[in-house]
């Protein structure tokens, strides 16, 4: 059974880079079945898609975040990574990793809260 | 401001049928399928309905989805207390280079 687990610092300072990892178990991140994506949810608010990547390296990003986001995969560690540059308090959110299969965001990790504060 | 529009709240009593609407545009709901998610307090969203009206295994048939034009709906029949949650619609948007868009969420209260 495919499982996703996010990890990373819970606190990031303004203007710095937010870096998160999603560890994948139950299947290979090199599988051609999935896109691997990130979604976030500010406290008390709705969901926002950040971006997705295919095992080939092809990626898609939310137009509102594109200039600050890098998504990558590490096949040796079976992990997905997210880097979000120049963060502000508005980037405070629970960050989820998820798989995208046949145009469905189907499997989600449990999420990790990242707070941007000095 | 979310790209897809949902009512912020809905309510019903046990056993009732409630519906949650989701309104979009030609570039998202009008061109692509709609998925629905249930988010219980403090948990990750769970896929409830996909491809407009399909249920993953394990989701009760009390939950059903439909789509017409640029709008979609989620119906919950035989409402139960454990259905109290936030519900989100989602669709791919073909504008720009393409991206996923969500509704702002509907908080369902079981009275």
Image (cartoon, helix red, strand yellow):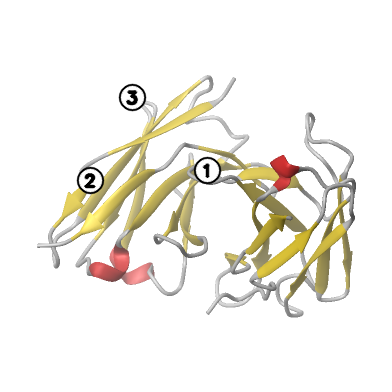
Pointer 3 chain? A
| Residue at the image point whose x is 85% and y is 45% from the top | B54
Q: Is residue B85 above or below residue B31?
A: above
**Alpha carbon of mark 2 to alpha carbon of mark 1: how far?**
17 Å
Residue neighbourhood size for the residue with mark 2, other residues' Cα within 10 Å, grouped as few (<14), some (14–19), many (≥20): some
| Residue at the image point whose x is 52% and y is 79% from the top | B1
Residue A76 - label: 3
Specify the farthest residue to the front.
Answer: B111
**Alpha carbon of mark 3 to alpha carbon of mark 1: how far?**
27 Å
Disc 1, SS: loop
Whether callout 2 and callout 1 share a subunit is answered no
Residue neighbourhood size for the residue with mark 1, other residues' Cα within 10 Å, grouped as few (<14), some (14–19), many (≥20): many
The residue closer to the viewer here, B3 or B21, is B21
- Are the residues at dot 2 and dot 1 in contact (C-beta closer than 8 Å)? no
Q: Decide if residue A36 is in sight here.
A: yes
Residue neighbourhood size for the residue with mark 3, other residues' Cα within 10 Å, grouped as few (<14), some (14–19), many (≥20): few
């Amino acid at each position: 059974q495919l499982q996703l687990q996010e990890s990373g610092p819970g606190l990031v300072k303004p203007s710095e880079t937010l870096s998160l990892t999603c560890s994948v178990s139950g299947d290979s991140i090199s599988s051609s079945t999935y896109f691997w994506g990130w979604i976030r949810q500010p406290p008390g608010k709705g969901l926002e898609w950040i971006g997705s990547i295919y095992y080939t390296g092809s990626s898609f990003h939310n137009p509102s975040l594109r200039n600050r986001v890098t998504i990558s995969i590490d096949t040796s560690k079976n992990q997905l990574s997210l880097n979000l540059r120049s963060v502000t308090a508005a980037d405070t959110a629970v960050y989820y990793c998820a798989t995208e299969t046949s145009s469905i965001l189907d499997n989600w990790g449990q999420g990790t809260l990242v707070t941007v504060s000095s | 401001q979310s790209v897809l529009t949902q009512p912020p709240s809905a309510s019903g009593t046990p056993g009732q049928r409630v519906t949650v609407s989701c309104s979009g545009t030609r570039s998202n709901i009008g061109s692509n399928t709609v998925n629905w998610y249930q988010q219980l307090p403090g948990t990750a969203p769970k896929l409830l309905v996909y491809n407009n009206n399909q249920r993953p295994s394990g989701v009760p048939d009390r939950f059903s989805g439909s789509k017409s034009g640029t709008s979609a709906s989620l119906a919950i029949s035989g409402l139960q207390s454990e259905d109290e949650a936030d519900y989100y619609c989602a669709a791919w948007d073909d504008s720009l280079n393409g991206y996923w868009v969500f509704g702002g969420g509907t908080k369902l209260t079981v009275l």
